[in-house]
Image (cartoon, grey):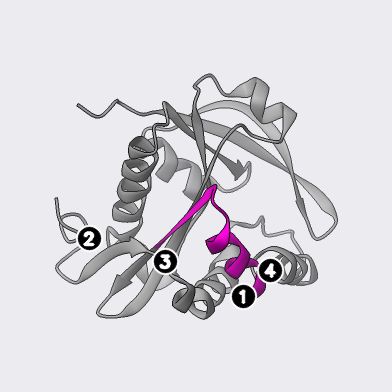
Amino acid sequence: MNGTDTAGPATSVRPATAGDVPTLAAVAAATFVLACPPSMSPERVDAFVSEVLSAERFTAYLAAPDRHLLLAERDGSALGYAMLVVGEPADEDVRHAIRLRPTVELSKIYVLPEAHGTGAAALLMQRALEWARAAGAAGVWLGVNQQNERAQRFYAKSGFERVGTKRFLVGGIHEDDYVMERTLTPLL
C-alpha cells in the first residue's frame, strides 16, 4: 500500500529525520493543547510544551534507539506526527493494565486542526501500527486524557479498547488518563 491510500492523493507519512526537528516541535506546540481538558491553564500547557515538546527534546527523541517518529505531510507541509516507544512501560499502572507483550507505546499522535477529517490521522495511525508490528510488538498501548472524548472515539475506531487508568503529569499537576490497548495481528 502506498502513502496515499487513506488520506487523499497528496498525503504521505514517512520516518522523521533530524532535519524535521523544528517542524516536529512546531506541530507539537500547536497540537498538544487540543488534547488537554478545557480547564487546563495556558501556563501548564506552555510548561509541558517547554519541558517535553521542545526542539531539544525532539532531537533527543530522534536519537533514542527505543523511539520512532513519523511525520504526516501534504504537498511538503506538515500535518501531524506520531511517536512510538518500544519496551516495557515505566509506569506501574500501565504495566498492570496492559495484557500484551512485547509492547509498543503510541506515545504521541497528533494532527493539526486543518487536517482533522481528512484521513491524515487514520493514515498516520496505520503507519504507526505497521511499524509496531514490524518491530515485533504483540500490542500497542496509549494514554488519553479522560476528558478527551474526540481522541477516545478515534482510538476506539482504530481498534483500541480501554484496559485501565493512569496519571499523567502536566505542568506540575496530575491529570487522569485512560490506558487503551490494541492487539496487533502478526505479519504473515
Tell me the CA gap for discs 4 and 2.
Answer: 28 Å
Question: Is residue 88 shown left or right of residue 124?
Answer: right
Label 2 sits on a secondary structure element that is loop
Which residue is label 4 attached to? 49
What residue lies at 24% left-to-right and 79% top-to-bottom? 75
- In percent of width and height, residue 182 lies at 43, 30
> Of marks 1 and 3, which one's residue comes earlier in the chain?
3
Q: Which residues are magenta?
A: 54-70
Is 174 included in the stretch rendered in magenta?
no
Identify the disc placed on residue 55. 1
Q: CA distance from mark 1 to mark 3?
A: 13 Å
Q: CA distance from mark 3 to mark 4?
A: 19 Å
Dot 4: what SS? helix
**Residue sitting at 22 percent across and 60 percent down?**
7
Q: Which residue is mark 2?
A: 7
Q: Residue at x 77, y 68 (%)?
A: 47
Question: What amino acid is labelled 2 in the image?
Answer: Ala
Cα gap from disc 2 to disc 1, whole angstroms: 27 Å
Q: Disc 2 vs disc 1: Cβ atoms closer than 8 Å?
A: no
